[in-house]
Image (cartoon, helix red, strand yellow):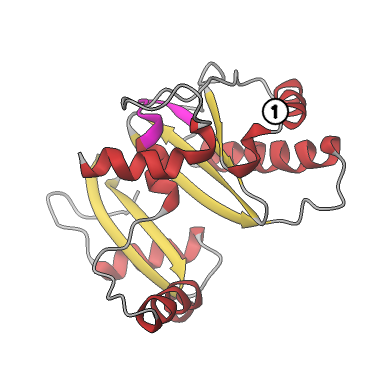
Amino acid sequence: TVPTPLEQPVTEGAVLEVAEEVLPLSQEETYFSWQTIAPGQGGQQVLLVGVPREVIDSQVRALKAAGLNPQVLGLKTLALARAVNRKDALVLNIETTSFDTIVIADGIAELLRTSAWQPAGLSTEERAEQLVSALKLTISFYDAHHPGAHFNPATPLFITGQMSGDLSLIEDIQGDIEYSIEPLAPSLEYPVHQPISQYAVNLALALKAT
C-alpha cells in the first residue's frame, strides 16, 4: 500500500520509497515495474516487481548473442500465479538451484519471492525444513503487513517445479505445515501422463497465449 492524498495518482517517487522498505536491493541494482491495482486503506494498492539488473541484463545479452531480440519479459512467479488460477493460494515452486514462494490473496499475487538454494548434500528432511521455513517467513511477512486480515490457514498450497515429483519431499513438507497440498489442475487439455506440476510455467505461458 502506497500512501497517497485522496483521489491523487500514485507517483513513481512514492512507489520507490515504499520499495526500499520491503525489498533488499537498491534502486541502482534493481529494475522496478509497478502498476496501481485498487484503492486501499490509507492509500493505493500497488503491484510492485523488483528484479536484480544483473539477472535481466545477462539474459538479454545471451538472447541477443543467439540472434534473438526479446520484446516482452514475463516473470516465472507471475506465470505460476496464473497457472494456479485461485482467488487465494500459496505456491511453492522448487527447482534444483532456486525456489519460489508466492502468496495469492483475494485474486492478487501479493508476494512473489525467489530464493537461491543448494539442496545437494541435504537430506530430504533438511530440504523440507528449509522450504517450510521459507513459506512460514513469507506468510509472517504478509500477516505483518495485513494486521486485520491474516492469511487463512485453510488456503491450499500448490507445489510445482522440477523437484515437485519428489514424493518423499512433498510428504515431509505436508507434515510440517498446516496448509493442505492440492494438485495443480490448469484449464488446458494435456496428456494424462504429463507431470503437469513440473511444467507449470510452460502451461501458464500457454494459458496467456490463449
Up/down of 126 relative to 64, above or below: above
Residue 136 point in image, percent of width and height:
66, 36
Q: Which residue is drawn at 50% across and 78% down?
A: 54
Is residue 44 among what the camera can see?
Answer: yes
Q: Is residue 64 magenta?
A: no
Is residue 173 positioned above or below 73 on the image?
above
Q: The C terminus appears in which quarter of the rendering? A: top left
Q: Name the residue under label 1.
A: 170
Residue at the spot 47% in from the left edge and 25% down from the top edge? 184
Q: Where is residue 117 in the image (x, y as percent from the top left)?
A: 71, 56
**Along the line of sight, the residue nearer the viewer: 144 or 122:** 122
How many numbered callouts? 1
Does residue 8 lie above or below 92 as drawn? below
| The residue positioned farthest toward the left in the image shown | 7
Type of amino acid at the residue the image marks with label 1:
Ile
Which one is in front, 113 or 42? 113
**Residue at horizontal 49 percent and vertical 30 percent from the top:** 194
**Magenta segment boundaries in residue numbering:** 83-91
